[in-house]
Amino acid sequence: MYVGKSVTRVDAYDKVTGRAKYTEDLMKNGTYSAKIKHSTIAHGKVISIDISKASQVEGVIKIITCFDVPKHTFPTAGHPWSLDKDHQDIADRNLLNEHVRYYGDDVAVVIAENDVQATKAINLIEVEYEEYEPVFDPIESMTKGLKPIHDEYPDNIIGHTKNRIGDYENAIKEEGLIKVEGWYETPIVQHSHIENHIVYAYQANGKVVVVASTQIPHIVRRVCGQALGIPWGRVRVIKPYIGGGFGNKQDALYEPLCAYLTTQVGGHPVKLDSDREETFVSSRTRHSQKFHIISYVRKDGTFVARKLELYSNNGGYASHGHSICAKGTNCFHQLYPCENIEADGYTVYTNLPTAGAMRGYGIPQAMFAYESHLDDIAKAIGMNPLELRMKTIMPKGYVDAFSRNENYYDTFREVMKVGRKVIDYDKKIEEYKNQKGNIRRGVGLATFWYNTAVYPISVETSSCRMVLNQDGSIQVQLGETEIGQGGDTAFSQMAADVVGVPIEDVHIVSTQDTDVTPFGLGAYASRQTYVASFSIANTGKILKEKIIERARKILEFAPKNLDLVEGNIIRTTDKRVLATLGELATESLYDKKESEHISAEATYTIRNNAYSFGCSFAEVEIDIALAKVKILRLVNVHDCGKLINPRLAEAQAHGGMSMAVGFALSEELKYGDNGKILNDNLLDYKLSTTMDHPEFEVYFIENPEPTSPYNTKSLGEPPTCSPAPAIRNAILNATGVGVTRLPMNPHVLFPLFKEAGLIENDYEQDMKYDL
Amino acid sequence: MYDIKKIYEAYTTDEAIKLKKEHPDASFIAGGSDVLVKIREGRMAGKELISLQLIDELKGVSLEDDGTLRVGALTSFTHITNDKLVQKYCKTLGEAVDTAGGPQLRNIATIGGNICNAAPSADSAATVMAYDAIIELKGENGIRQVPVRDFYVGYATVDLQDTEVMTAVKIKKESYENYYGHYFKYAMRNAMDIAISSCSANVKFTDDGLVEDVRVAYGVASSVPIRAPKVEKTLRGLKITDNNINVFAKNALDELKPRDSWRASQALRKQILYEITVRCLKEIRKEYQGGLNA
């Protein structure tokens, strides 16, 4: 059995030796280079574009402007297509835009023989705009009554979730309640995957072939078809290895535009290779969100009534629309169940870069707000934050009325118990009371709520194909993509177990090609292992039955007495090896009388979802005068069901925690008064480095998930959800300062420390030399 | 793909000077860690370049007869940090350049390039200022020695004339002997970052443990790396007490002009400049006192 063992990644050797091929490795010499002219205003209309000088640049093949492209709009979200028209993604994009909605919007394209020529020409294109007043704040955008960013949404509101439980207004009348109120805010951050977005396209055999760094090849095929107005089957999308995505590539980015460009130059290959600056500004970001929370609690910590207003800044285009904000709004009443809830979540267009999916899908922001607020409540009622959580958090047996997700175990209390012990929480809380001086330490925790897949909001389907080779090895193909997370390895382990072959004999086909690969929706949510497990189990069972049936014919034993174990056909009664699978496969394919290509292919429609919970504990040391936070320890505890591959699981948690450390302490995409992003590079955008991390500590509780054939559930996104509030709460514990906005960098901390009077050696005091 | 018009390769300093004479509009490129970035950003796109990278005579560290430490302009940061002479005589220089970027950058970045690029945040700059170093230049008219404090003439501008190539940075014996030094780089990350502010200090003590001399220099406290000459004089002859360190650091702020920008507020920069001056001097005191007790 391979499931549960730390087998080596199936792609490890190719990746470290450089044999693994990425999009850029596959392009042929002579591929044209396309560069995009981006808008230099945040909101307005293109009046005219002068390409006369740009056209003169040597090597320029063609210039296309927003006036030339098809006029119909298309959606870009990497969601499964909805058969229900009302639930289809918002189609608000053109390939190039006359109405520009953010500083960096796409208004024209130059296709040239090489990058340098294309860039030269881009710089010579002159664009004349009619400018409208831009708006960058979601609340202002909803209320200010400016010219709509999209005419179809006059108040700029993309979506509104309204949750009501009980009677909030009546409940707060109870005497003796303590009211705790706070505003919390998270910044725009960006995925910063190593490989920028890259795509090239050409035409062949009557099709447009798109090779792209994407998480979602089958979805991109559909979106390209919609964008170009051609049948979806006329688009072929190929996804090689990719250098990270983290949700940014769960959107059709420049694939539709690139697909269109090749059709404008006779099908010649054209590439669109975004640079880092474009990736920051013109792909997708994580939503900046503002939260206003009011909690009415009794002195013993019982929650009586709670209110939430959430404003999610979506930028200029809908991308994933309201779904990210909705997720954060919906978890508010689940994490800490309360009888009286009023929650409103708004997703709002603004004139900033477009926000889309990013690891955690709104939950890292929500957890920062909700879990910071929880410590603020604890402080207000004088209760230990861990004790308050133990008392109020979701109990075992809780079932969400909408999703029907069930909390089968007392996961939250179990994970907190582990974290408490590992970090020596109770002792540290005592030790760090009443500190003085410039260096102070603190300990804090935060939990997170998550779920695995997208059911029942969207379809959950997975398809798999297995083919038996002449030597008894098998090919496995799935629509679920390897994006660095280790999916191919987990799939191989599961396939080996269900079929009954050694893992070396499982050849996972990593590249998805929509002409060949079974239909699947790609990599998103934290669902690949979970959803693929159903189709792998299903398909593997069919393949195995076919193999056993073939063995019956040859060996003339009753099928119930035959089994396939580690590549051998055995007689179950005495475990005798009757034949190897290799022998059987060779015989089967070369039999002159009755040859048989043994293969299996099946789809599984998954009609459930699984909660995935955990927590983080952080210990920090603050240098107050330098306004700096050093993380001494960061511990994540997860219940993601049974681990398929413990070593990969731990590595995945490390990656998520690293991302969370940047979110907590240093990352923020900043913009100027005109909406221009100021720090669109990896120097000024402070992605954290390994030198800013402690050794990450990860623990797992393996409560078997009853809905999964391998008892497993999500781990991809969860590790990034709770470290930021845990660090925030540790800072609160150390200094008494409750930070309400991320990142908690010196720019934010210094004024707060100063205001709190914590800076002891203040240069503003009078001083004289001792002579 | 980089937009480079043409590149000329020099193998000796004299060849570089000759090439510069023939192609006055061409720019020098050493390690490339600044020039290539500027070409990519378009600021130096389409230029001719003269490469200095293969001029071996400009690489390495040596001690001249009079005890002057000579660091060739093309010596990489990694080399400087690992160099025994630097570690023995001017260790703060080795420590300062070790804070730049990451290992790959430090393997290609040269001290001459770092000084001539003249960014106020350059990690070598504050420390060569604090060591009162001399910049050696060679051009068609011969060799020039310029004190580093006169070499920075304005934002991102140095006193490099016509055909001149920087050949070395030199630190005289009297500038390093018996001085204790410390460099404090304050950045938002612990690696791969440039300074929000930096401070490099050198202090020499009298036999009685009083301050005999102090030199303090700053990065990102003005448009160029700068010293604080007025306040330097005030600490001489005094004890290096906590209070005196604080007063010194506070008064140093009067000679600095930290900016208010989106990268950091002026209020934060002032706090940092004050605090890192205090910490530099305290580290120096600790090392000095540790040496006495040893």
Image (cartoon, rainbow, N blue to C red):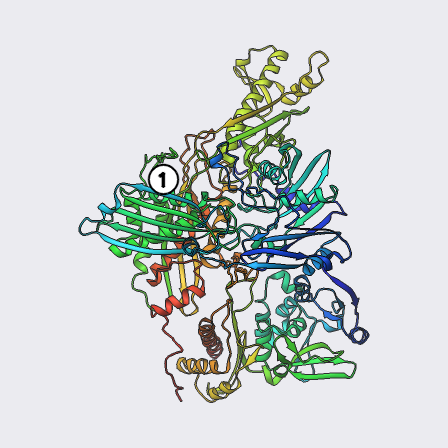
Residue at the spot x=51%, y=27% of the render?
A604
For residue A552, side relative to residue A720 (left or right): right
Marked residue chain, label 1 = A
For residue B111, side relative to residue A562 (left or right): right
Label 1: few (<14), some (14–19) or many (≥20) C-alpha neighbours in 10 Å: many
Quadrant in which residue B69 is drawn: bottom right
Horizontal and vertical percent for residue A398?
Answer: 32, 36
User: Looking at the picture, does residue A716 appear above or below residue B247?
Assistant: above
Q: What residue is pinned by disc 1? A: A411
Q: Is residue A4 visible?
A: no
Horizontal and vertical percent for residue A118?
Answer: 71, 55
Quadrant in which residue B194 is drawn: bottom right
Quadrant in which residue B162 is drawn: bottom right
Horizontal and vertical percent for residue A62?
Answer: 73, 50
Disc 1 is placed on an element classified as helix
Residue at the left extreme, as displayed: A175
